[in-house]
Amino acid sequence: MSFLITVLLGGAMLAVLAALFGGLYAMTRGSEFSRKHSNRFMRARVFLQALALLLFLLLLLQSR
């Protein structure tokens, strides 16, 4: 079970990076694309960070 949580945590961390770079890309493009997508990327990043933190806490509690 701990292996599964570790793999999910790694995937969540990579997804956070993808959302972060997607938001940075949206900011550099500017104009209409930025208005449509930058807030969406920010919300996705915050959600994914919360998910990664939850998985990290589960991993810590399981290893006790």
Image: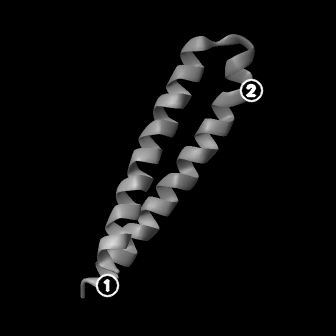
Q: Quadrant of residue 41?
A: top right
Q: Earlier in the sequence, mark 2 or mark 1?
A: 2
| Residue 45 x, y percent position in the rendering | 54, 45
| Residue 6 x, y percent position in the rendering | 32, 66
Looking at the image, which residue is at 60% across and 12% down?
29
For label 1, the crowd category at 10 Å Cα-Cα, with few meaning under 14, some 14 to 19 and many 20 or more, is few
Q: Quadrant of the C terminus?
A: bottom left
SS class of the residue under badge 2?
helix
| Cα distance in 3D space between marks 2 and 1 | 40 Å
Q: Residue furthest bottom?
A: 64
Looking at the image, which residue is at 68% across and 29% down?
37
Above or below, comparing residue 42 to residue 31 in the picture = below
Of the numbered discs in the image, which one, if any, rests on residue 13? Answer: none
Q: How many marks?
A: 2
For label 2, the crowd category at 10 Å Cα-Cα, with few meaning under 14, some 14 to 19 and many 20 or more, is few
Looking at the image, which residue is at 52% across and 53% down?
48
Left or right: 5 as drawn, with respect to 64:
right
Q: Which residue is mark 2?
A: 36
Amino acid carrying label 2: it is: Lys
Amino acid carrying label 1: it is: Gln
Q: Are marks 2 and 1 in contact (CB under 8 Å)?
A: no
| Residue 39 x, y percent position in the rendering | 67, 35
Of the numbered discs in the image, which one, if any, rests on residue 62? Answer: 1
| Residue 9 x, y percent position in the rendering | 38, 61
Above or below, comparing residue 8 to residue 48 in the picture = below
SS class of the residue under badge 1?
helix
Above or below, comparing residue 5 to residue 48 in the picture = below
